[in-house]
Image (cartoon, grey):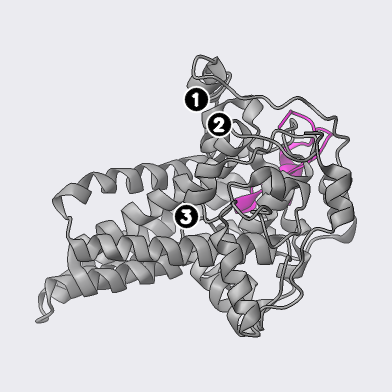
C-alpha cells in the first residue's frame, strides 16, 4: 500500500492515519509503545528459557520416555506462545472508540471503482515473474518490523524442517501428511475460513461451524478473525494499490512476500471488517489462544509416531498447504482464462483448482463472491462444493448461495 491511508498494526504498534502523529501520540495509541512491548516479550522469553532449563533438570530425575520429555517442552513453549500472542493482539481485541472504528471502516466499506482490463498472462521472461517483487532493493533494504521477523522466522523454520523429510520417510507418515492436508486444507481453510466464515455462502449448525474453524487453526495460516479479515480486504481492493497481495507488485510478492512487510499490509490488522466473528466468544478465544492449537497437534503427532510423524504431519503438510493456498493469490491472478467481467486479473486456473480443492476457479469466485460453488461448469472440479452438497443432503448445510442466472448473463464476457 502507499504511504497514505489508514494502517492498524498488530502487536499494539499503533494506528497510522493520513496525518502525521507525534511519538507520544503513537505510544498512547500503541498501548505502551513498541519499546514497552519488546521489553515485555524479552522478559517473557527469558523467563520461558529459564523455565525450560529448570524443567529439563526436573524431568531428568523422573523416569520419563525421551519423547514425553520433548512433548512436555513443546507444551511449555505453546503456553509461552499464547502469552506472547495475547500481548500482540491486545490492541486489536480491545474495544475501539466508535469514531475511530468508523474512520477505519471507511477504508474497506466503499467499493473501488473498477475498470475492465484485458487479461494479462505474465510470460516467464517478464521481470514481474522472476523478481521477488518489482522493486527488490526497496523491499530488502527497508527496516523490518518485529512482526516481519517473527513471520519470516516461522517460514524459514518450517521450510528448513522439510529438509529432514527424505530421512524420516515412512508410508504411514506420508499417509498422515496427505490426510491432514485434506482435512486442514479443504475442511479448515476452503470450506470453513473461506467459503463459510469470510463469504457466508452457506450455514451449518454451530457445533459443526466451530469444529471446522478449529480445524482451520491447525493449518498455521492464522486464526479465523485474522484470515477472514485479510481476505475481505483483498476482495474490496482487488488488484489495486491497496490490495495486500497484488500481482502488479510481482509474482512472488503476491505469492508470499507480502506477508513479511507489515508496513505495507498493516491495514490487515484492522479487523473491524469482521464484526460477525468478533461478536462470538469462540472466535475471540481462538484468536487469543491461537498458537497453542497447532502446537498440541504437533505434540500429539510426535507422541504417536516420533520424528517421522512430526516432520511429515506438521512441517511438510504445513508447507505444502501454504504454497497451495498462496497459488490462489499468485498463479490464479496471472495464468488462466476469464469468463466474467470482474474488473481485475482473477483467472480460472484448472491446475490450481485441482490442487486447492476448487479454489482455482478464481474468476468465477471474484464474479460471484458469495457463491458456495466455485466450479460453475460441470467439468470444473470443485471438491469443496461436493462436500457442501453432501452436507446439504445430510441436513447439515443450509442457506447455500448460488449465483442467479440474471447476474451470470450480466457479467458473462462475450465469447
Q: Which mark is residue 397?
A: none
Residue at image coords 68%, 47%: 268
Q: Which residue is mark 2?
A: 253
Q: Which mark is residue 41?
A: 3
In the rendered image, residue 164 lying in the magenta stretch gets the answer: no
Quadrant housing residue 202:
bottom right
Which of the pair 298/199 is nearer the observer? 199
| Percent coordinates x, y for residue 315 in the rendering | 32, 54
Residue at image coords 54%, 61%: 383
Q: Which residue is mark 1?
A: 132
Which of the pair 163/289 is nearer the observer? 163
Q: Residues within 10 Å of mark 3 (few under 14, many from 20)?
A: some
Q: Magenta part of the protein: which range?
A: 1-29
Which of the pair 8/260 is nearer the observer? 260
Q: Is residue 52 above or below residue 406?
A: below
Residue at image coords 57%, 60%: 190
Which of the pair 27/144 is nearer the observer? 144
Q: Earlier in the sequence, mark 3 or mark 2?
A: 3
Amino acid at each position: 500500500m502507499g504511504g497514505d491511508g489508514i494502517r492498524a498494526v498488530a502487536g499494539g504498534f499503533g494506528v497510522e492515519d493520513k496525518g502525521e502523529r507525534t511519538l507520544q501520540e503513537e505510544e498512547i495509541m500503541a498501548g505502551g509503545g513498541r519499546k514497552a512491548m519488546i521489553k515485555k516479550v524479552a522478559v517473557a522469553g527469558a523467563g520461558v528459557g529459564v523455565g525450560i532449563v529448570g524443567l529439563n533438570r526436573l524431568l531428568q530425575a523422573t523416569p520419563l520416555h525421551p519423547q514425553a520429555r520433548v512433548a512436555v517442552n513443546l507444551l511449555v513453549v505453546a503456553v509461552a506462545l499464547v502469552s506472547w500472542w495475547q500481548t500482540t493482539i491486545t490492541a486489536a481485541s480491545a474495544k475501539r472508540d466508535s469514531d475511530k472504528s468508523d474512520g477505519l471502516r471507511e477504508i474497506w466499506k466503499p467499493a473501488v471503482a473498477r475498470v475492465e482490463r484485458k487479461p494479462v498472462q505474465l510470460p516467464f521472461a517478464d521481470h514481474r515473474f522472476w523478481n521477488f517483487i518489482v522493486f527488490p532493493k526497496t523491499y530488502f533494504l527497508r527496516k523490518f518490523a518485529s512482526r516481519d521477523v517473527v513471520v519470516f522466522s516461522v517460514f524459514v523454520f518450517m521450510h528448513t524442517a522439510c529438509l529432514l523429510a527424505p530421512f524420516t520417510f515412512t508410508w504411514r507418515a506420508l499417509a498422515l501428511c496427505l490426510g491432514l492436508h485434506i482435512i486442514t486444507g479443504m475442511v479448515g481453510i476452503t470450506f470453513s475460513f473461506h467459503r463459510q466464515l469470510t463469504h457466508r455462502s452457506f450455514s451449518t449448525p454451530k457445533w459443526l461451524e466451530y469444529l471446522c474453524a478449529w480445524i482451520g487453526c491447525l493449518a498455521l495460516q492464522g486464526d479465523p478473525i485474522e484470515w477472514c479479515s485479510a481476505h475481505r480486504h483483498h476482495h474490496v481492493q482487488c488488484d489495486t494499490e491497496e490490495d495486500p497481495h497484488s500481482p502488479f507488485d510481482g509474482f512472488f510478492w503476491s505469492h508470499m512476500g507480502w506477508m513479511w512487510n507489515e508496513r505495507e499490509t498493516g491495514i490487515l490488522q484492522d479487523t473491524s471488517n469482521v464484526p460477525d466473528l468478533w461478536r462470538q466468544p469462540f472466535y475471540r478465544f481462538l484468536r487469543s489462544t491461537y498458537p497453542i492449537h497447532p502446537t498440541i497437534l504437533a505434540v500429539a503427532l510426535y507422541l504417536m509416531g516420533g520424528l517421522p510423524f512430526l516432520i511429515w504431519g506438521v512441517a511438510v503438510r504445513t508447507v505444502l498447504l501454504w504454497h497451495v493456498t498462496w497459488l490462489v493469490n499468485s498463479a490464479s491472478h496471472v495464468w488462466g482464462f476469464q469468463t466474467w467481467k470482474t474488473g481485475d486479473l482473477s483467472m480460472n486456473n484448472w491446475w490450481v483448482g485441482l490442487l486447492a480443492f476448487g479454489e482455482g476457479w478464481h474468476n468465477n469466485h471474484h464474479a460471484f463472491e458469495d457463491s458456495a460453488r466455485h466450479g460453475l461448469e460441470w467439468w470444473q472440479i470443485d471438491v469443496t462444493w461436493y462436500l457442501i452438497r453432501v452436507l446439504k443432503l445430510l441436513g447439515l448445510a443450509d442457506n447455500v448461495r448460488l449465483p442467479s442466472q440474471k447476474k451470470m448473463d450480466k457479467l458473462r464476457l462475450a465469447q
